[in-house]
Image (cartoon, grey):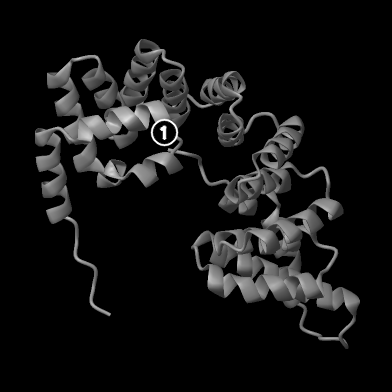
Amino acid sequence: MRNRTLILSVILTLSWWNLAQSARGQALVPYTPPLDSEQLKQTGLGLLEEAAQLTRFQQYQLALPRAELATQLAPDSYQAWALLGSLYLQLDKLDQGIEFLQKAKSLEPKDPGIQFILGEAYFKKGDYQKSVQSLEAALKLDPKVPGALFDLGNAYYMLGRLDQAILQYEKAFAQESSLWPAINNVGLVKYEQGEIDTAIVKWRQAIKIDPKAAEPLLALAVALYTKGEAAEALSLGETALRLDGRYANSDYLKENLWGDRLLKDTQKFLANPQIQKVLVEVKDTQPTPPSP
């Protein structure tokens, strides 16, 4: 599991509801004076509330025009620019999303939520150095965000700074003991460093936290298979692939930060006749897409 999406957490970190209550209070005033800048601002904040609610339910296309209008009516609201930026990220318009998030940051440089989202945005864009810079800046403002520590570990991993990646994964796990992806990724790093036994320990630990997590199950299966422990490896691999057949796809594994050594060994494991049979069965049980 490459990362945990932080973008939707913007709703929780940027004080939408305080703004919403203010806007709603204005709307209840029975007398409507001529429009002025303050009233326009309150209208914008009301639209911001609507956009935030739609975002919570992943209605991004509906939220986007409301967020855009909110930035026009309340241009000094960093929350409006932050939400607009996060929506563009969800729609894979990274450059526009980053531009609006930078605008939000200029209005409120001390809000860690904006920096967290920027770190995620830069990671998606493949600018891992800027991702590290944004996440480190955010964590200085709020160091107790396990998901951000995990993302920082991923950015370090992509930069080849493996020891620093492990440190961040361990910090994340220390803060959130159910965060199995952090322990899983320590295993990924250790495997690439040739420490297969250590990787096995980490993947067993991740599975103990979540026995239905397909990724550490398959990684452990590959490691055991490589060591010649075929019986347990095949059993674990079959379980993993029945839980999530996407892990038989090398591109998907690369997205989840599986390194060259592990990918090479995985291809050997997947070529096993018993596993090939499982893959056919898994493919046959996939739901057929509806006709257009």
Assess disc 1: are there few (<14), some (14-19) or many (≥20) residues with their C-alpha within 10 Å of its C-alpha.
many
Helix, strand or loop at mark 1? loop
Res. 177 in view: yes
Camera-nearest residue between 222 and 243: 222
Apparent side of residue 88 relative to residue 69 in the rendered image (left or right) = left
Camera-nearest residue between 92 and 171: 92
Query: Hey, which residue is sitting farthest bottom in the picture?
Result: 34
Apparent side of residue 200 relative to residue 285 in the rendered image (left or right) = right
Q: Quadrant of residue 267?
A: top left
Q: Position of residue 149 (x, y in %)?
A: 60, 31
Q: Residue at x 46, y 17 (%)?
A: 193
Q: Residue at x 51, y 24 (%)?
A: 173
Q: Residue at x 78, y 54 (%)?
A: 102
The residue carrying mark 1 is: 258
Res. 216 in view: no
Camera-nearest residue between 72 and 124: 124
